[in-house]
Image (tube, helix red, strand yellow):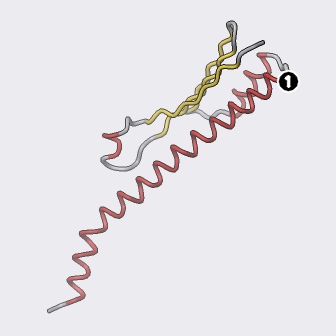
C-alpha cells in the first residue's frame, strides 16, 4: 500500500476547505478593520464639533481621508448627523451568497446641540 499517495489524496480533499476558511478569515478581518476605521473617523468628527469647528471644516476633514469606496453624509438640522459607509468586496466563494457583495459597512452618530 502506497502511503504517499494516500496523504496526497487526503491533502487534495482538505485543501479547498482550508482555503475557504482562510479567505473567510481575511474577509471578516477586512470588515472589522473598516468598521473600526469608520468609528475612529466619526469620533474625530465628534471632537471637532465639541471644539466648535465649522461645518465646512468638518466636511473637508471627512472628505480628505476617505477613499473611493467610502461615502459620507453630514446633515445639520437641529442636531448634526454624521454617517460614513464603506463597501468591501467579498472574496470567499460561497460567503458572497450569505453576505451581499459588496458588503456595506457603516457607522453613524447623532450629535445633539445644547
Tag count: 1
Residue reaching furthest to the bottom: 1
Residue reaching furthest to the front: 114
Residue drawn at point x = 42 percent, y = 59 percent: 22
Direction from residue 101 to residue 53 in the image, left or right: right
In percent of width and height, residue 40 lies at 68, 37
Q: Residues within 10 Å of mark 1 (few under 14, many from 20)?
A: few
Is residue 6 shown above or below 98?
below
Q: State which quarter of the image contains the C terminus.
A: top right
Residue drawn at point x = 22 percent, y = 76 percent: 9
Image quadrant assignment for residue 77 = top right
In percent of width and height, residue 111 lies at 70, 19
Image quadrant assignment for residue 99 = top left
Direction from residue 74 to residue 53 in the image, left or right: right
In percent of width and height, residue 79 lies at 69, 12
Mark 1 lies on residue: 51
Direction from residue 3 to residue 24 in the image, left or right: right
Image quadrant assignment for residue 84 = top right
Residue drawn at point x = 75 percent, y = 32 percent: 44
Direction from residue 29 to residue 57 in the image, left or right: right
77 vs 96, nearest the viewer: 77
Is residue 77 shown above or below 47?
above
Amino acid at each position: 500500500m502506497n502511503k504517499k499517495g494516500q496523504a496526497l489524496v487526503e491533502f487534495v480533499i482538505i485543501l479547498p476547505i482550508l482555503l475557504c476558511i482562510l479567505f473567510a478569515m481575511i474577509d471578516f478581518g477586512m470588515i472589522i478593520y473598516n468598521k473600526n476605521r469608520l468609528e475612529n473617523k466619526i469620533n474625530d468628527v465628534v471632537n471637532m464639533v465639541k471644539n466648535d469647528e465649522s461645518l465646512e471644516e468638518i466636511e473637508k476633514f471627512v472628505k480628505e481621508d476617505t477613499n473611493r469606496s467610502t461615502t459620507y453624509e453630514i446633515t445639520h438640522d437641529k442636531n448634526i448627523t454624521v454617517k460614513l459607509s464603506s463597501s468591501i468586496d467579498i472574496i470567499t466563494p460561497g460567503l458572497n451568497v450569505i453576505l451581499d457583495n459588496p458588503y456595506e459597512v457603516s457607522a453613524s452618530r447623532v450629535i445633539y446641540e445644547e
